[in-house]
Image (cartoon, rainbow, N blue to C red):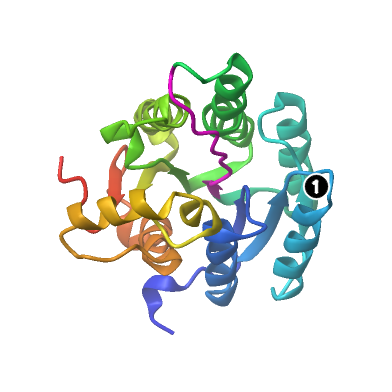
Amino acid sequence: MADWIDFTGKVVLVTGSSRGIGAGLVKALDKAGARCVVNYVADAGGRNLADATAVAAALTEQHLVECDVANYEQAGRMIAHVEQMFGALDILINNAGVLRDRSLKKMTPADWQAVIGVNLTGTFNCLQQATRILRPGGRVVNLASVSGSLGFFGQANYAASKAGVMALTKVAARELAKSQITVNAIAPGVIDTEMGRAIPEEATKKFLEQVPLGRIGSVEDVVDAALFLCSSHAQYITGQIIHVNGGLYLG
């Protein structure tokens, strides 16, 4: 295994890791030697628990924690749980996110609050709570989105939340630098996940027409960028937004 993806003994928490990009992240980090904590939020049908359990079962160590990241107290308990298990944290990846796309005219306050609550407030909650247990030299990676830069139709809540994540990333990078903790964000384009596949087929075709590389992104495309940012090779990179979108956004 290449040295640059050697995370032996590192303690990692990935929020929203029951499936999709989050699941891909914990599997890759586990393979590289990290001790990963899988996070999920409880849902009425129990699907998130079932998926998270399956992800954890495939890891070298099985660590599973329920938490709604939008809830500050729950986020605090999750971080305390990680501290109790491992003593400290090396890598935090704020991946949990939701979509509730609607035009401005049709978007309800509940639609707005739900997305802002998980995507932006949830990132803040976990980041702030984790600062007390992140080891010096630690890594934080926040999941943003190309929507935060381009502002797609019907995504007032989502785009605003992800733009907020980008700004929060830059502030946190400045504030945590004294502990040599780097804070960066990854802004994926359209990725082949359940969330990405929820985009109407016609809209996806239009996206592809604008993507120079001519394809939808894979989970591995995002995972590889995160592995680099979490590695020792990225120790002088902080406060950056890494766009993983095949050239859809070139700003």
Q: Nearer the viewer, residue 61 or 98?
A: 98
Q: Main secondary structure of the magenta part?
A: loop
Give SS at disc 1: helix
| Residue 172 spot, x, y in % from top left | 42, 29
Q: Quick check: can you spot residue 172? A: no
Q: Residues within 10 Å of mark 1 (few under 14, many from 20)?
A: few
Q: Which of the 4 quarters of the picture holds residue 98?
A: top right
Instruction: Say which amino acid is labelled 1.
Output: Gln
Image position of 198 with respect to 52: above or below: above
Left/right of residue 88 with respect to residue 249 in the rendered view:
right
Residue 94 within the magenta-colored segment of the rendering = yes
Image position of 145 with respect to 65: above or below: above
Q: Which residue is farthest front?
A: 202
x 45%, y 37%: residue: 179
Q: How many marks?
A: 1
| Residue 109 spot, x, y in % from top left | 59, 14
Image position of 81 with respect to 48: above or below: above
Q: Which of the 4 quarters of the picture holds residue 245?
A: bottom left
